[in-house]
Image: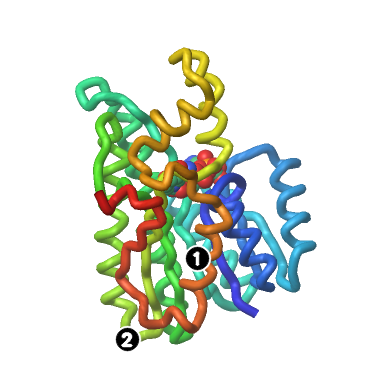
Amino acid sequence: MKTVIITGSTSGIGLGIAENFALSGYNVVLNGLGQQDEIEATRARLASLGAGEVIFHGANMLKPDEITDLVKTAEMKFGRVDVIVPNAGIQHVEKIEDFPPEKWDAIIGINLSSAFHLIRAAMPGMKKNGFGRIIAIASAHGLVASPYKSAYVAAKHGILGLIKTVALEGAEFGVTANAICPGYVETPLVTGQIADTAKARNMTEDEVINEVILKAQPTKKFVQVGQIAALASYLASDQAAQITGAALPMDGGWTAQ
Ligand code: NAD
């Protein structure tokens, strides 16, 4: 039975990826912020989906020691870690001259440095086992920029460099490292803003989706969490052994422009 750690899996994309791995029978290590009772309900629900066990570890992605403990805990509990999904992330949108330095530090810490600490802790076990899958959830913003997102775009571009480097280091040990680069994904974080934006701009919700949120996305459709989860499961499989060091867009054509 294989074991996967997904950071930031109490919500959105990470939760969808965790569900898919649970359904496939993996042991799943959940992580993220949230209310304890809600997290326990999620843990129990995922545990009922498949044959594997589901545990939660509350490591704060700003604390390297806690990230190391996340990996150690999974290794102690399940004997090995096969797949890691650095996914936790936050956003802040502001022009650079007003961008709060503490927001820069938090975004670089959570969206980029936490992936370094996670991979650093998991790599020795993966190399020893001769198998590992590192699947970072980057963004279309790992490939192109948008204004007012300096820290996020820098962190997501950084993740791609980290993944390529780790791919080279893991290549002879059966360890692959790839990044998924989603466009706009239909998570509560994004859809929750639609009604407010419609009101603020005096537009219909459809106009907000097409002309504001999905302006850059030629399909004019959100990426679905399940579509990302399916790609993550494929990248974790034996069939994906020769895909490594890749940045795979799933962005409705955004970065083709
Ligand atoms: P989300 O807000 O629904 O989930 C973020 C997760 O990260 C949550 O579980 C949260 O608890 C966790 N998290 C935040 N700070 C943390 C910390 N300090 N320690 C531990 N966990 C922490 O967002 P999402 O949309 O699911 O985003 C997940 C990833 O996908 C992010 O890296 C994001 O940049 C990326 N992404 C999202 C979109 C999108 O449109 N939603 C598009 C491209 C990439």
Q: Is residue 23 above or below residue 221?
A: below
At label 2, counting other C-alpha atoms closer than 10 Å, the crowd grade (few under 14, some 14-19, many 20 or more) is few
Q: Is residue 180 above or below residue 196?
A: below
Instruction: Mark yes or no: residue 62 visible.
Output: no
Q: Which quadrant holds the N terminus?
A: bottom right
The label nearer to you, 1 versus 2, is 1
Write down the residue under mark 2: 172
Tags 1 and 2 in contact by the CB under 8 Å rule? no
Amino acid type of disc 2? Glu
Q: Is mark 2 within 8 Å of ligand 1?
A: no
**Among numbered discs 1 and 2, the one appearing first in the sequence:** 2
The CA distance from mark 1 to mark 2 is 21 Å
Label 2's element? helix
Where is residue 33 shown, x and y percent of the image?
58, 42
Quarter residue 213 falls in: top left
**In front of the other: 229 or 221:** 221
Q: In the rendering, which numbered label is found on residue 232?
A: 1
| Residue 188 - label | none
Q: Residue at x 54, y 69 (%)?
A: 233
Q: Is residue 238 left or right of residue 44?
A: left
Question: Is residue 233 in view?
Answer: yes
Element class at badge 1: helix
Relative vertical location of residue 22 with respect to residue 198 in this rendering, above or below: below
Question: What sort of colour scheme is used for the picture?
Answer: rainbow
Taking the spot 75% from the left edge, 64% from the top edge, the residue there is 49
What residue appears at the point 30 percent right and 34 percent down from the top-left corner? 149
